[in-house]
């Protein structure tokens, strides 16, 4: 008789996931072995295709974009394309379709620039609700669809492992390159600062109508390795791919050299690191420093393994998920440095019913999380809006406000229909958190069902091993220089001065309103009052009037500053209170929550089992 598997459904799903990933790895091994025996055409982008290096004129930008696209359409299948150690400049819109067995090797830099007019992909264009203008998705920098058997890499990165008779083959998944940052890796640079623009102002101008750096959809059997993806205008790697391996690569999107994520850095909004749809995915030995989700598992994803990830952004994320099911996802052996959120699972919108199940986070270290170490519940974000529509009020939300809980009357509630099932967090260490340990929010109608915290420990002290870390070693992508003409210490100071001026002006209006409510004389005098003032002046009391007027102005200014400081103090108090709070800020809508081992603190809606 056939053998009977006696484990749980969770164990069975993990086993199937590992078997699938092993099969994918074996496919790559056999593919690499067969490659040498197959004839393949090799092209140099400059010599054979006609690309022009080191030139940023508009004519060259258009020429290189058209030339690259033309090659992908006509000659890419069963060929290899090499980019020399030079910088090649493009506009977004490099496009390829129906490509089979194509390798691209980058030794230099592919750099993209913002065109005068950002065009949308034709198939995505629809009219807005008032039929007054077209909206759609802008052309990604590189867009490939309906293709298979692709490799994106640097020229022969594995050759250095054959030196000295080591016999290691870089196509062997059993070999782990712990020093991939020392390899000569090519760069794909989205030149994001041209799209981010002046902090805040740039976002108001373009909102989300910014290109992804690399988009692949309806594609299978892809290997991405030994590359640096820098300053994507929006999402960096947007991959709807089955049978995918991403390894030994870096993602970096930042506006300053700061050790963390300043307000200026965070204006590089929605610069997700790796967004993944599809199935059978293995991402390992990758470092990501960005201003949004480091890794985001998206709708319909299944059978994905992430390991040895170094991240600094908004953490290791599943979501936001809509009306689809996501299952068999594992994150393990990873390190998060000063993330806004650490572990983050989320559903979006109140419509429909989604499912996130069979998830394992294991051996994860979170150092100095800035907001929440763990978040399981609704997506904390602004209300949805189209790419070209007016930006929404930041505190608006369908489920959970971005302003919650700092701003009064902001709300956060569990999804009424979507559900988490069979979620395990094991050996999670959160050191020196700046906010609360976390938030766990389900709903009465769709509770979180079967969640285990095994050795999930929050500690104030930072172990010696994590003190004085070498960021460039942990994040090799940070060796890339910051190139942002809109952000410098002087300009950042200027921006903050403008913000302070606006805040004081707003506070002055409030102070004037309060003054009028209490009948304080701040406006122009009536004719009768003017006569009285004249009499006072004739009586030699002009100095007294001037002194009284100055006092009123001074009181108005001080009142305005007091209002600004009061608001700042209230919001800071909320942050400080969360930092000092040892317990999880919210724990509700949970069924079958269990804490085991050395877990501390135990969430209030969990049961502890020794």
Image (tube, rainbow, N blue to C red):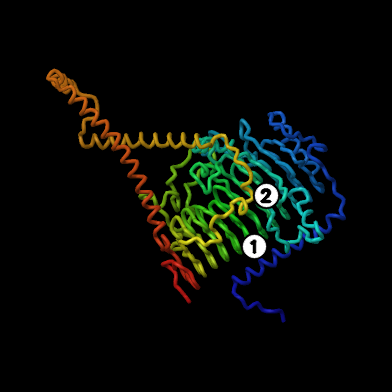
- Which residue sits at x=72%, y=48%? 184
Residue 563 has which mark? none
- Dot 1 crowding, Cα within 10 Å, few <14, some 14–19, many 20+: many
Marks 2 and 1, how far apart at CA: 18 Å
Quadrant housing residue 309? bottom right
Mark 2 or mark 1: whose residue is earlier in sequence: 2
Q: Residue at the bottom extreme? A: 1
| Front label number (2 vs 1) | 1
Find numbered disc 1 in the image and state the secondary structure of the residue it sits on: strand
In the rendered view, does 590 fall on the left or right side of 534?
right
Residue 217 has which mark? 2
Nearer the observer, 470 or 495: 470
Q: Residue 346 in the image: x percent, y percent?
A: 51, 56
**Residue occupied by mark 1:** 303
Q: Is residue 168 visible?
A: yes
- Which residue sits at x=78%, y=43%? 82
Quadrant housing residue 542? top left
Cβ atoms under marks 2 and 1 closer than 8 Å: no
- Dot 2 crowding, Cα within 10 Å, few <14, some 14–19, many 20+: some
């Amino acid at each position: 008789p056939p053998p009977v598997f006696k484990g749980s459904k969770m164990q069975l799903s993990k086993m199937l996931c590992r078997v699938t990933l092993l099969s994918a790895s074996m496919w790559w091994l056999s593919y690499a072995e067969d490659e040498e025996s197959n004839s393949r055409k090799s092209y140099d982008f400059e010599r054979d295709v006609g690309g022009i290096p080191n030139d940023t004129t508009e004519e060259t930008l258009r020429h290189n974009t058209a030339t690259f696209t033309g090659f992908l359409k006509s000659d890419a299948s069963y060929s290899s394309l090499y980019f020399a150690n030079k910088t090649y400049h493009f506009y977004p819109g490099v496009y390829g379709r129906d490509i089979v067995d194509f390798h691209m090797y980058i030794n230099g830099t592919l750099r993209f620039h913002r065109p005068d007019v950002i065009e949308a992909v034709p198939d995505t264009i629809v009219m807005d609700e008032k039929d007054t203008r077209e909206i759609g998705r802008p052309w990604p920098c590189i867009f490939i669809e309906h293709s298979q058997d692709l490799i994106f890499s640097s020229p022969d990165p594995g050759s250095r492992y054959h030196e000295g008779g080591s016999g290691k083959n870089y196509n062997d998944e059993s070999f782990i390159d712990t020093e991939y940052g020392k390899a000569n890796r090519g760069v794909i640079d989205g030149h994001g600062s041209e799209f981010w623009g002046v902090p805040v102002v740039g976002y108001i101008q373009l909102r989300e109508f910014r290109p992804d750096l690399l988009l692949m959809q309806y594609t299978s059997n892809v290997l991405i390795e030994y590359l640096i993806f820098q300053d994507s205008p929006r999402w960096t790697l947007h991959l709807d791919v089955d049978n995918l391996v991403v390894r030994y690569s870096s993602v970096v999107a930042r506006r300053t050299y700061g050790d963390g994520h300043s307000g200026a850095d965070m204006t590089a909004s929605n610069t997700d690191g790796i967004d993944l749809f599809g199935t059978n995915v293995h991402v390992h030995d990758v470092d990501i420093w960005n201003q949004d989700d480091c890794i985001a598992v998206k709708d319909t994803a299944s059978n994905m393994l992430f390991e040895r990830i170094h991240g600094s952004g908004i953490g290791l994320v599943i979501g936001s998920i809509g009306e689809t099911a996501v299952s068999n996802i594992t994150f393990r052996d990873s390190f998060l440095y000063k993330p806004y959120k650490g572990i983050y699972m989320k559903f979006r919108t109140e419509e429909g019913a989604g499912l996130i199940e069979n998830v394992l986070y294991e051996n994860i270290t979170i150092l100095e999380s800035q907001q929440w170490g763990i978040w399981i519940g609704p997506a904390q974000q602004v209300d949805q809006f189209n790419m070209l529509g007016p930006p929404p009020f930041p505190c608006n939300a369908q489920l959970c406000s971005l302003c919650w809980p700092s701003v009064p009357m902001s709300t956060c509630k569990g999804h009424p229909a979507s559900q988490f099932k069979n979620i395990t967090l094991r050996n999670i260490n959160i050191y020196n958190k700046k906010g609360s340990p976390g938030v766990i929010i389900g709903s009465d109608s769709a509770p979180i069902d079967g969640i285990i915290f095994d050795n999930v420990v929050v500690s104030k002290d930072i172990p010696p091993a994590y003190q004085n870390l070498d960021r460039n070693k942990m994040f090799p992508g940070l060796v890339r220089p910051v190139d942002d003409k809109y952000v410098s210490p002087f300009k950042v100071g200027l921006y903050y001065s403008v913000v302070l001026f606006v805040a004081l002006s707003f506070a002055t209006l409030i102070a004037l309103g309060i003054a009028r409510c209490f009948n304080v004389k701040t406006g122009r005098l009536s004719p009768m009052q003017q006569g009285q003032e004249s009499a006072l002046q004739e009586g030699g009391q002009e100095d007294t009037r001037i002194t009284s007027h100055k006092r009123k102005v001074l009181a108005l200014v001080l009142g305005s500053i007091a209002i600004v400081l009061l608001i700042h103090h209230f919001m800071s108090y909320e942050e400080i209170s969360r930092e000092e709070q040892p317990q999880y800020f919210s724990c509700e809508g949970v069924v079958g929550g269990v804490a085991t081992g050395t877990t501390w603190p135990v969430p209030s809606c969990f049961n502890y089992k020794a």
